[in-house]
Amino acid sequence: MSSSPDAGAVRRISSGGPYEDVIGYSRAVQLPNGLVLVSGCTAADAGGPYDQTVAAFDVAFKALAQAGLGPEDVVRTRMYLTHARDVEEVGRAHKELFDAVRPAATMLIVSGFVDPSMVVEVEVEAYKAVSA
């Protein structure tokens, strides 16, 4: 589900997730200049670090699709991991998803997430020029 603001306005995209209303955020925000910012995405029930990374990026891709963008429009990714031992698996998933796109990317080790079964969280920024 998403909102449809007037042209030139910021568009806020919802995935319908329960925490969006509880915490007060949007899954993604589309700016009038063509930039789309996707909130942190996780996938605690997806298994290990590789699987959680692929599933979390899939959540982000669904939000981008609502904005009319795809993985090929991604210009920046951020990956937050709870363990340095997972860098290779998360990196492997990222390479498989973005090798042809080559976005700017950051990978950080953090102390933890709200759900201890989460080992990775991803953020995505994408851009597609706005037609005049």
Image (tube, rainbow, N blue to C red):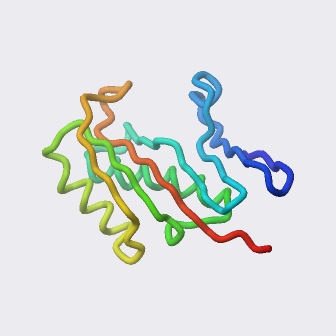
Q: Residue furthest top?
A: 22
Farthest residue in the bottom direction? 100
Residue drawn 40% across and 47% down?
A: 122
The residue shown at (28%, 53%) is: 50
**Name of the residue lying farthest toward the left:** 85
Q: Quadrant of the C terminus?
A: bottom right
Residue 16 is situated, as x and y percent measured from the top left of the image, at 65, 38
Q: Nearer the viewer, residue 55 or 36?
A: 36
Question: Residue 123, image x and y in percent?
Answer: 44, 48
Above or below — where is 23 with respect to 132?
above
Q: Position of residue 106 (x, y in %)?
A: 32, 53
Give how far across and how far down residue 111 sits, in percent. 24, 29
**Residue 117 falls in which quadrant of the image?**
top left
Q: Residue at x 53, y 69 (%)?
A: 73
Picture quadrant of residue 1: top right
Left or right: 48 in relation to 17: left
Residue 4 vs residue 126: left or right?
right
Q: Residue at x 51, y 52 (%)?
A: 60
Horizontal side of 73 relative to 10 (left or right) equals: left
Q: Nearer the viewer, residue 38 or 117?
A: 38
In the depicted structure, whether residue 67 falls above or below residue 20? below
**Total number of numbered labels?**
0
Check the image and report above or below for 70 versus 110. Answer: below
In the picture shown, does residue 18 fall above or below 84? above
